[in-house]
Amino acid sequence: MRYPADHKQKTRQRILDAAAVVFRREGLQAGSVDKVMGEAGLTAGGFYTHFTSKEALFAEMLTEALRQGRVIFGKEDEGLTGSERIRAIVGKYLSPAHRRMIDRGCPMPPLLPELPRAGEPARRAFEEALGAIVAALEPHLEEDGGATRSDRALALVALLVGGMTLSRAVADDALANRILAACRDQIDASLGAKSD
């Protein structure tokens, strides 16, 4: 049976998409090749046709998942600039809806704890993706009190990811929502007065 010319690339993408779900839900250690391939609707035997190792899959999946980030790179906010754009991103990211989307939301909160135990290729891939996120945020931030736009973007990412991670770690929904609101308020205050 002959496959279409793009069959291998489409299969690889299915594996990457499945890995994004499995690794977010179960982590790198518990998210086995068998689970990833099962999520993709494929047999485990075909894995090594596409990837050299589970860690190689993890590094590529993390890079792609971050690049596809709908909140940071979303098309619906393209017309917004400056603090309006940042407020739109923050409102979506630090929301109760995003908090409930562990296996489909931003991969940073569930997967960053995996990176210290991952190899250097995964950490380097993450650094590159983080650089792209910071670069996307920088134009919408002003320098403030000696802090460069780049430093402010790094701090913003840290508050977004840290706030989401902390809100997911508690059992009480009211406390989780309070954490998200406190982070939103801190970011809002750092942006200054809203424009009309």
Image (cartoon, rainbow, N blue to C red):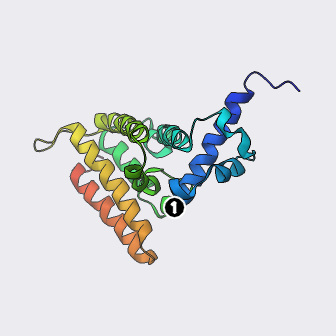
Q: Label 1 is placed on what type of residue? A: Ala
Tell whether 179 sits left or right of 7: left
Q: In this rendering, would 28 be left or right of 175?
A: right
Residue farthest right in this picture = 1
Helix, strand or loop status at disc 1: helix
Location of residue 193 with respect to 69 vertically, above or below: below
Q: What x and y, as percent, mark residue 97?
A: 51, 61
Residue at the image point whose x is 33% and y is 33% from the top: 135
Query: Whole-percent x and y of residue 72?
Result: 43, 42
Q: Residue at x 75, y 47 (%)?
A: 41
Q: Is 144 placed left or right of 182 in the picture? A: left
Q: What is the count of numbered marks?
A: 1
Q: Residue at x 61, y 53 (%)?
A: 32
The quadrant in which the N terminus is found is: top right
Residue shown at 27%/44% (left/top)? 154
Q: Nearer the viewer, residue 28 or 103?
A: 28
Residue 68 horizontal/vertical position (percent): 51, 39
Q: Is residue 178 visible?
A: yes
Left or right of 30: which side holds 109? left
Please provide percent x and percent y for residue 174. 42, 76
The residue singled out by tag 1 in the image is: 97
* Visible residue check, residue 104: no
Q: Residues within 10 Å of mark 1 (few under 14, many from 20)?
A: few
Q: Nearer the viewer, residue 192 or 36?
A: 36
Residue positioned most to the top: 5
Return the residue nearer the eye: 121 or 126.
121
Placement of 114 over or under 8, stated as above or below: below
Where, by quadrant of the figure, is residue 123 drawn?
top left
Which of the 4 image quarters holds residue 122? top left
